Image (cartoon, helix red, strand yellow):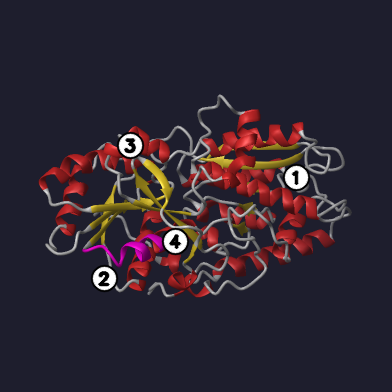
Amino acid sequence: MTGRRRIRSTFLPRLHRPVRATALAATALAACASLTVGCGVVPGATGGSGDDPIKVMTWAPMNTGATNKPGMPAFAQAYARWINSHGGIGGRKLSVLVCNDHNDAVSAAKCAQRAVDEGVVAVVGSYSQYGDAFFPTLEGADIPYIGGYGITNAEFDSVASFPVNGGQPSLLAGLGKELGGSCGPVALVRPDSIAGDELHVMLDSGLKASGHAAADDLLAAEDATEYSAQSERALARTTGDPVQKGCVLPALGDRTSTFMDSFRRAREDFPDVRTGTVLGSVDQTVIDASGGASGPYEGSYITGWYPVATDRRWDPMRKVIKEQAFDDNRIDPADAGVQTTWLAYTVFKAAVDSLGDGELTSTAVRKALDEGLKVDTNGLTPALDWDYENGLGAIGLPRLVNTEVTLQAVRKGRLVAARKGFTDVRQTLANADVS
C-alpha cells in the first residue's frame, strides 16, 4: 500500500464529460458561423482532401519500464502499406502517424495535441492508461478515438470514444464469474495505479454473480523487477481453506510474467492454488517463454475479448502481416493489442467507406459511427454499433457496446478455447457495486 491518494471516481457516472463536449460543440458551431470557409474543411481538420492521403494516428507506450505495446503502431503502419498496395481506401492512400505515449500523462496529452495539429481524421487502434489526459483534446477537436485497448474506463465514457472490446471491466467480470463457483479464497494482484484502481470492482462483480465473496485486493508496483512479497501475501491469503483450493489472479500487464517468476518460487512453501488472468497480461508467447506445459500457467483460466489466435477468422489479419510485416518481430498475431488494432482499422475503413463521395473529415467519421453504422468484424466480435443505450451508463460505462468475452485455458502448454463461443457479461457489469 502506498501513500498515494486513491481515486475511485472512474466507476461513477461521469456526466462532466458529455456536458463539456456539448459545450465545446456549441462553441465550435458558433466559431464556424463566423468563418468564410465551411466547417470541416478548415486546415488541420480534414485529414486531406481530394486525392490527398487520409491521415490517422496510432499511439502506444514503447521502450518504457512498464507495459509496452510496440506491436500496435507497427501493425497500423503495416496495415497502411497493405491497404495502399490494394488501392487504398476509396482510392486514397492511408497515412498512419505514430506517437509514443511513454506511459505518462504528459506524453499522452502531447500525442493528442499532435493529432489535432496534424489534422488527423481519427486516432485508431491505440493504447494509453491516461484517457483523462487526452480525451478533452480529442473531444474539443471532434476527433474520434476508435478501438482503444480498453485499459481505462475513460474509453467507455468519452463521447469521442468508439471501443471495439469490453476492456478490462469485461475481462475481470468474466474471470470472476467463471472462477467464483470453483475457487476458495481469491486474491487479485494488480497495479498500484489509477488504471489498476478500477480492476477489483469488476472482478468482484463477477465473483458476486457466482455467489463468491470479494477478492483480496493486493497492490503491486507496475514496473517492479520482482514480486516475492506480493506472491507470499497472495498465497497466504488464498491457502487458508483446507476444503476449497484458492485462486491467485495477477493482472499486471507486461509484468505478469515477472510476477509469475516470483510466484513459482514462493508457491513451493504453500499448499497448491489455481491461477487465472486476463488476455493482455498473458498470451501464447508468454506461456512458451515461461516453460509451456511445465510452466506456472498450466491449468490457468484466461478471459479474452476475442477467439483464440489460431481461429481462422484471424486469417485476413495474418495475411496483412505476412505480406507487409513478416519479419517484424514487434508484431505478434496472438497479441491482444495487435488484434485490437486490426479490428479498429476494420471499423475505421467501414466508416470511411460509408461516407461514399461525401467529404471526409473527423466530424464526418464520428457522425457515421454515432448515427447507426453497424460494423461486421467477421465474427471476431458481435456486430459493433454505438447508436443505442447500452444500459451501463449508471456505472460510468455508457460507450461499452461489446460485453462479450471468451474463456480460454492453458492445456499442455497451449492456449485453447475452454468454452465455445462468447459469454455475455452485460448483466454482471450492470450489477457492479460502484458505491
Q: Residue at 45%, 44% (x, y): give it.
A: 104
In the rendered image, which residue does mark 1 sit on? 44
For the residues marked 1 and 4, what is the alpha-carbon distance in whole angstroms? 35 Å
Q: x and y percent of residue 8 in the render?
A: 38, 65
Q: Residue at 79%, 45% (x, y): give it.
A: 43
In the rendered image, which residue does mark 2 sit on? 213
For the residues marked 3 and 2, what is the alpha-carbon distance in whole angstroms? 32 Å
In the rendered image, which residue does mark 3 sit on? 292
Q: Amino acid at mark 4?
A: Pro
Closer to viewer: mark 2 or mark 1: 2
Q: x and y percent of residue 404 in the render?
A: 51, 62
Q: Amino acid at mark 1?
A: Gly
Q: Is residue 276 on the magenta stretch? A: no
Q: Which mark is residue 368?
A: none
Closer to viewer: mark 3 or mark 2: 3
In the rendered image, which residue does mark 4 sit on? 169
Describe the element under mark 1 as helix, strand or loop: loop
- Magenta residues span 174-184
For the residues marked 4 and 2, what is the alpha-carbon distance in whole angstroms? 18 Å
Residue density around tag 3, few if under 14, some if 14–19, many if 20 or more, within 10 Å:
many
Describe the element under mark 3 as helix, strand or loop: helix
